[in-house]
Amino acid sequence: MPRFEPHPDRRPALIAGASSGIGAATAEALAELGFPVALGARRIEQCEALAAKIASNGGEAFAHYLDVGDTASVDAFVTAAEAALGPAEIVVSGAGDLSFSLVHEMSPEHFLQQINVHLIGVQRLANRVIPGMIARQRGDFVIISSDTANNPRPRMGAYPAAKTAVEVMARQIWMELEGTGVRASLVRPGPTLTGMGMDTTAEIIGPVLEDWSKWGFARHPEMLRAAHLATSIVAVVSAPRGAHIQLTEVQPEARVLSGDAGSRS
Ligand code: NDP
């Protein structure tokens, strides 16, 4: 008898936050490898366009509206996705947005909205999908965190607090799921060029970057691409049974220095 049942051949993957950025790149990467993918986000037309592109490339994809801030919406998304593709083998929790603000200047209502998406949104997904995974004795629940977890940067509103909380929750989930066959994993990106923060203005981002530099952040200007994170998420969920990649931090590689500037001597 093997110590672990291997992964089944068909592993439907549900992706929250699949209309752009890391979620969209992950959906494409998984679909290319033969995983059926369910794409969820509020911009359903973007999810549908990506699902059509995946299908035209020979993949299997399903799109459905999803607002992780709303329990009924999470339930509707998971129910529809599982009806279309089969029980969730993989769930990637990547939904999120960012509002730059000093903590004391952010309205409590806006602060709560951010916590609602980044922390409780993840718990909503966990509440909806993990019991089924436990019953099947397998499944990957992947949470996209941030390198601001336990490492806050100024002027990021509720974001670092929410990401720190989600990492604490993930570590608790690891303990609670030990021995069930279900793997919960954290993928912690550094700065990544996506839709996140792109709706900001020069007046807002100027002081943000000044404060970051004052506190020692942004050591170099390179940024990750969404596809880099997709590669990491694929690696996490592709780990064979018996291995559990609990935490992956991905940072942008610094540009190779050339000439005299590159000399370390
Ligand atoms: P994008 O803005 O490109 O993607 C965010 C996705 O989340 C979109 O598909 C968006 O879709 C979705 N989303 C936002 N709010 C909700 C909601 N309430 N319900 C459902 N979906 C929602 O940014 P990224 O790809 O960068 O972000 C993905 C994850 O990566 C986030 O958790 C983010 O915190 C994290 N991250 C990003 C970093 C970066 O530098 N970009 C660094 C560290 C972590 P829609 O608006 O259509 O609902």
Image (tube, rainbow, N blue to C red):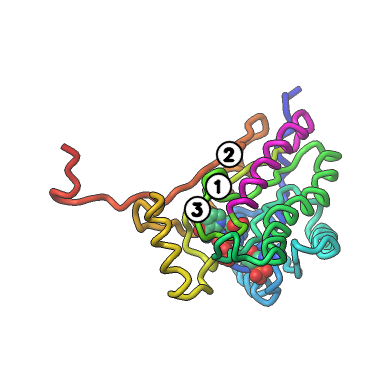
Question: Secondary structure under badge 2?
Answer: strand
Q: Quadrant of ligand 1?
A: bottom right
Q: Residues within 10 Å of mark 1 (few under 14, many from 20)?
A: many
Q: Main secondary structure of the magenta part?
A: helix
- Circle 1 residue: 188
Please report the bounds of the magenta region as a residue range: 160-182
Q: Secondary structure at mark 3?
A: loop
First in sequence, mark 2 or 3: give its number.
Answer: 3
For the residue carrying disc 3, how many other residues have a C-alpha within 10 Å: few (<14), some (14-19), or many (20+)? some
In the image, taking residue 160 as reference, residue 77 lies left or right, namely right
Where is mark 3, residue-wise?
153
Name above or below for residue 259 compared with residue 5. Answer: below
The picture places residue 134, in percent across and down from the top left corner, at 82, 39
* Pointers 1 and 3 in contact (C-beta within 8 Å): no
Q: Nearer the viewer, residue 21 or 159?
A: 159
CB atoms at circles 1 and 2 under 8 Å apart?
Answer: yes
Q: Name the residue located 83 percent from the left edge and 40 percent from the top edge.
A: 136
Cα–Cα gap, marks 2 and 3 = 21 Å
- Please determine whether, in this image, residue 145 is positioned above or below residue 199: above
User: Can residue 29 be seen by looking at this rendering?
Assistant: no
Q: Looking at the picture, which amino acid does disc 2 mark?
A: Leu
Q: Quadrant of the N terminus?
A: top right
